[in-house]
Image: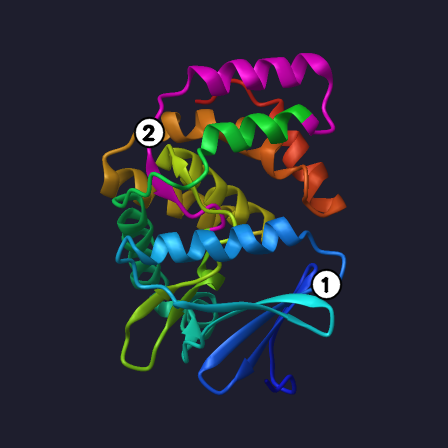
Amino acid sequence: MKFDNVISVGINKTVYRDGDHAIKVFDADYSKADVLNEALNQARVEETGLNIPKAIEVSKIDGKWAIVTEYISGKTLETLMKENPENIDEYLDLFVELQMKVHSKKCQLLTKLKDKMNRKISIADLDENTRYELHTRLEGMPKHNKVCHGDFNPSNIIITESGIPYIIDWAHVTQGNASADVARTYLLFCLAGDRELADKYLDLFCAKSNTEKRYVQKWMPIVAASQSVKGRPEEREFLHSWTNVVDYE
């Protein structure tokens, strides 16, 4: 394998291209269990028929765990949005359609979203009363079993030259309530500093899926608390501000 072509650098991982393969190499101290779980999740999502890069192997490279997948040639939807701002409505429509397609799938072997969020809220840096209120709200939310990407944003959509979209990065996939996944995407747009686009996205998703906006908003404090556990310090401050939001217009 060659490691002279870096595709992206993230927290605790670097992705390289070697011919038709993408190689995600994790830091030496990264959890072995998390690496193996990510590879297993990707293999399970493959079986749903969604258009995603196929997992090829899990290996160790210089003492570091790595996941090898198909390399998908193209541009991310995030890049296309920046390069062609006049087409933002068209791109956002595609983005929502793709997320709805993910939510149309089921995969019973995936971790349950509610279980994962309960665990994270329990260790979140929040006072006891806030954690109790969030646990209570989470338990009261309807139980669904739809595939939820967990990090659905335009940088995780690759459009090939022929216009075929692929969805990448399935590290956070769960099965559960689609509105929690939508709340996560909304907060990701906000974290990127684009509240206007976040609101536009939420309005479009709710219109297309016939979902009440208030229903998605009820998930936002729960999702914010869950995501604050591993977020960057500056992100945690923003996410903590959302955990205190109780009522919405």
What type is the residue that disc 1 sits on? Asp
Name which residue lies at 62% across and 13% down: 132
Q: Is residue 202 visible?
A: yes
Which mark is drawn over residue 27? 1
For the residue carrying disc 1, how many other residues have a C-alpha within 10 Å: few (<14), some (14-19), or many (20+)? some
Classify residue 90 as left or right of residue 32: left
Pick whichever, 67 or 127, lies toward us.
67
Which mark is drawn over residue 179? none
Magenta range is 123-151
Name which residue lies at 49% across and 69% down: 57
The x and y percentages for residue 219 are 47, 28
Which mark is drawn over residue 144? 2
Pick whichever, 66 or 122, lies toward us.
66
- Whichever of labels 1 and 2 marks the residue nearer the N terminus, that label is 1
Q: Is residue 194 visible?
A: no
How far, Cα to Cα, is label 1 from label 2? 35 Å
Asked if residue 234 is positioned above or below residue 43 in the image, the reply reads above
For the residue carrying disc 2, how many other residues have a C-alpha within 10 Å: few (<14), some (14-19), or many (20+)? some
Q: Secondary structure at mark 1?
A: loop
Classify residue 164 as left or right of residue 68: left
Asked if residue 133 is positioned above or below residue 189 in the image, the reply reads above
What type is the residue that disc 2 sits on? His
Look at the image and tell me in which quarter the N terminus lies. Answer: bottom right
Magenta-span inclusion, residue 141: yes
The x and y percentages for residue 107 are 32, 43
Asked if residue 81 is positioned above or below residue 162 in the image, the reply reads above
Name which residue lies at 62% across and 31% down: 120
Pick whichever, 45 or 156, lies toward us.
45
